[in-house]
Amino acid sequence: MSAAITLILSVWLIAALLVAAGVFTWVERRGLGFLQERLGPNRVGPFGFFQWIADTVKLLFKADEVPPGGDALTFRLAPALAATPVLVGFAVVAFAPGWTISALDIGVIFILAMLALTVYAMVLGAWASRNRYAMLGGLRAAAQMLSYEAFFGLSLMGVVMLAGSMNLGQIVAAQEGLWFVVQQPLGAALFTIAGIAAAHRLPFDLQESEQDLVAGFMTEYSGMGFALFFLGEYLAILLVSALAVTLFFGGWLGPFLPAPVWFGLKVGALALAFVWIRAVLPRPRYDQLVAFAWKWALPLALVNLLATGAVVVLGGAA
Amino acid sequence: MSWGLAIWASALALAAAALAVTRDSVVHALLLLLAALVALGVAFFALASPFAGAIQLLIYAGAVVAVFVFVIMTVEAGPEARARERALLAGAWRWPAVVAVAALVPMLIGLGGAEEGTPGGVGAAELGLLMFGEWAVATELVSLLLIAGLIGVRALSRKGRDGE
């Protein structure tokens, strides 16, 4: 693929993702509305569909102020760090056979690295705000990220072992016949928990935790800074869903419909599951999450890895 | 592989590192250190070593600097503390600078004499074979360091608990 085509495809993909993230804000608000027996936004356009455009316009025109005593440069830079790495992470996602910007051989690790970089948005945004609630949120963000990052990577290494590759396209191709969620149920469960934490979503959004920290790390943000944090969150949901579909749910594989449609449908279903989980589960206490990550999830991920390794070596599979 | 991109990214990393050690604000310095590490990762990608590049981003940029930021954020120094620190550390940069130059000069000379080769890039599988085959003892020795760290953390956190 020539550089020019890659560039055009990248711009197209980014534009599509930004629209998808915008639409998803509407999906989430409507979905939460139904789950909580209320209506949600339903005034702008059919079923309130244009609400996300109205919100975007509002946020664009809102004043974007640096709090007194805050660090202006870092304050402005932090929201950009929330959305940019996630957008870069989509470069290695395989939407259909051959439909990928970069068929990187270590695609899985690349996505993990990009998701890990989003922690700086929260930590630096919190520090630059010079606000105690923000600071507490930022500290939680850093400690929480270190806690789940370890078993996040290990939970999906079972799949990598079975597929014999970290290339997202080859992992999907290896699931012809049987999805890895059947062979790796524990890995899939741990991945889901870590994925929710990686996307900074309820019930693991303790860095934001509006019941006790106002809005956590983003307390002082308004206008586009605020919007970029949410853009990063919604893009991360889509990226984690895409990764889960690729690793555990057979990627683009499926009967009758064309490959990219299957991929889109599966990602959409998982993204809706994110909304559903947010609506029904309470938030654990902060120390409970960190203790669970180190004392249960990490050892379980290691046991899963050991068992998978034994099966692969003894069974000669993959 | 792209030499142009690699050289550009390395220059960026060097500039960010130089700025990092000369900043007044520790958080700005950390931000620049982060930029330097990310640029280094990009250089690895440009030199056809995506595994090294991704690990650089995940471990160093993603995790190690995050721990630094975590600590630094909680001990942000005021103006008086900074002035006291500066008085204490006046001239302290000389010896590290000498060591850095002493290390850098042979490296640059060595680079000039290096053979023109294509960095093939070591894949994850080959790296695993090297680490747990030929260099297994060295790998285990390094892991001892991690155990020492773990024990240290345990000892420190126990000490804090006694007061409760």
Image (cartoon, coloured by chain):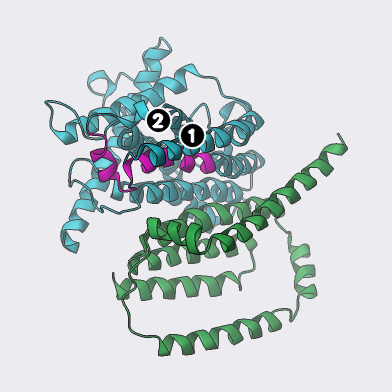
Residue type, label 1: Asn
- Quarter occupied by residue A6: bottom left
Q: Residue at x 60, y 43 (%)?
A: A138
The cyan-tinted chain is A
Question: Is A173 included in the stretch rendered in magenta?
Answer: yes
Residues drawn in magenta? A149-176
**For the view shown, which residue lies furthest in the right direction?**
B163
Residue type, label 2: Gln
Residue bearing mark 1: A304
- For the residue pair A98 and B98, the one nearer the viewer reads as A98
Is B77 placed left or right of A151 in the picture? right
The green-tinted chain is B
Q: Position of residue B142 (x, y in %)?
A: 61, 60
Q: Position of residue A100 (x, y in %)?
A: 22, 48
Q: Residue at x 45, y 45 (%)?
A: A225
Circle 1 Cα neighbour tier, 10 Å, few/some/many (<14 / 14–19 / ≥20) = many
**Element assignment for label 1:** helix
Q: Which numbered circle lies on residue B36?
A: none
Determine if residue A62 is in view: no
Q: Are marks 2 and 1 in contact (CB under 8 Å)?
A: yes
Q: Mark 1, chain letter?
A: A
Classified by dominant secondary structure, the portion drawn in magenta counts as helix
**For the view shown, which residue lies furthest in the top direction?**
A37
**Mark 2 and mark 1 on one chain:** yes
**Element assignment for label 2:** loop
Question: Is A140 included in the stretch rendered in magenta?
Answer: no
- Quarter occupied by residue B42: bottom left
- For the residue pair A52 and A217, the one nearer the viewer reads as A217
